[in-house]
Image (cartoon, rainbow, N blue to C red):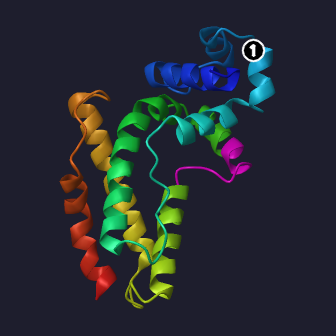
């Protein structure tokens, strides 16, 4: 396993147990068995490391599939199912950061330089729906931005409720749960 991979594994573990706010690069490097200087050879800063953990060590869900392939419903169910898993695991990582206004502001500013942040899944889903609309598979009158916000908001809220009820190690939700979240918005999209 490469040094970068070991650092990512250590960071994911520490961020899940202690939250992003309390996970230091020094602690992460030590857990990986490396110096902090080596950590910085692979990651510019803590924010890049955090983004790499989110992208590479968490369930993916911002990949919307290819517009025109599968059905719109199947693609949305896959996104929502991934979103539920992602938010359930991400919640304990991010909660400590959100509880500290100065840290939240600093993180917000840092993430901007990477074009990242919690708004990106909503934007990615809206772009996917817009591409499906251009292909005629989503109604011209559909409010794609609202549908994207509703679905990602549902993922966030349900992910939190799952974490609250059973922690991050509880059983995974079946795809049918995601399908039930998608079904109400299909009327808006497909008419």
Given residues 21 and 122, the one toward you in this image is 122
Please, what secondary structure does the residue beneath circle 1 have? helix
Give the residue at mark 1. Answer: 36
Whether residue 22 appears in this view of the structure is no
The percent position of residue 56, horizontal first and vertical second, equals 55, 38
**Quarter of the figure that contains the N terminus:** top right
Q: Residue at x 62, y 16 (%)?
A: 28
- Looking at the rendered structure, the number of numbered marks drawn on it comes to 1
78 over 139 or under it: above or below: above
The percent position of residue 99, horizontal first and vertical second, equals 48, 32
Tell me, yes or no, whether the highlighted magenta stretch contains residue 113: yes
4 over 124 or under it: above or below: above
Whether residue 8 appears in this view of the structure is yes
The percent position of residue 58, horizontal first and vertical second, equals 47, 38
Q: Tell me if mark 1 has few (under 14), some (14-19) or many (20+) residues whose alpha carbon lies within 10 angstroms of its own.
A: some
The answer to which image quadrant residue 59 occupies is top left
152 over 71 or under it: above or below: above
The answer to which image quadrant residue 190 occupies is bottom left
Query: Where does the magenta region start and end?
Result: 109-119
Given residues 83 and 9, the one toward you in this image is 9
The percent position of residue 52, horizontal first and vertical second, equals 62, 37
Q: Residue at x 35, y 62 (%)?
A: 151
Q: Residue at x 31, y 40 (%)?
A: 160
Q: Looking at the magenta stretch, what is its main secondary structure? A: loop
Q: Residue at x 63, y 50 (%)?
A: 116
**Quarter of the figure that contains the C terminus:** bottom left
């Amino acid at each position: 396993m490469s040094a970068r991979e070991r650092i990512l594994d250590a960071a994911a573990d520490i961020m899940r147990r202690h939250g992003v706010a309390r996970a230091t690069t020094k602690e992460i490097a030590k857990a990986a068995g490396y110096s902090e200087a080596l950590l910085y050879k692979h990651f510019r800063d803590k924010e890049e490391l955090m983004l790499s953990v989110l992208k590479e060590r968490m369930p993916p869900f911002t990949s919307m599939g290819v517009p025109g392939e599968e059905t719109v419903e199947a693609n949305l169910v896959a996104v929502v199912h991934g979103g539920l898993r992602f938010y359930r695991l991400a919640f304990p990582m991010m909660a400590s950061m959100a509880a500290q206004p100065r840290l939240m502001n600093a993180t917000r500013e840092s993430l901007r330089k990477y074009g990242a942040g919690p708004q990106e899944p909503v934007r990615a889903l809206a772009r996917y729906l817009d591409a499906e609309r251009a292909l005629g598979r989503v109604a011209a009158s559909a409010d794609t931005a609202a549908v994207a916000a509703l679905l990602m908001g549902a993922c966030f809220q349900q992910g939190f409720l799952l974490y609250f009820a059973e922690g991050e190690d509880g059983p995974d939700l079946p795809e049918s749960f995601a399908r039930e979240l998608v079904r109400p918005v299909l009327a808006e999209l497909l008419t």
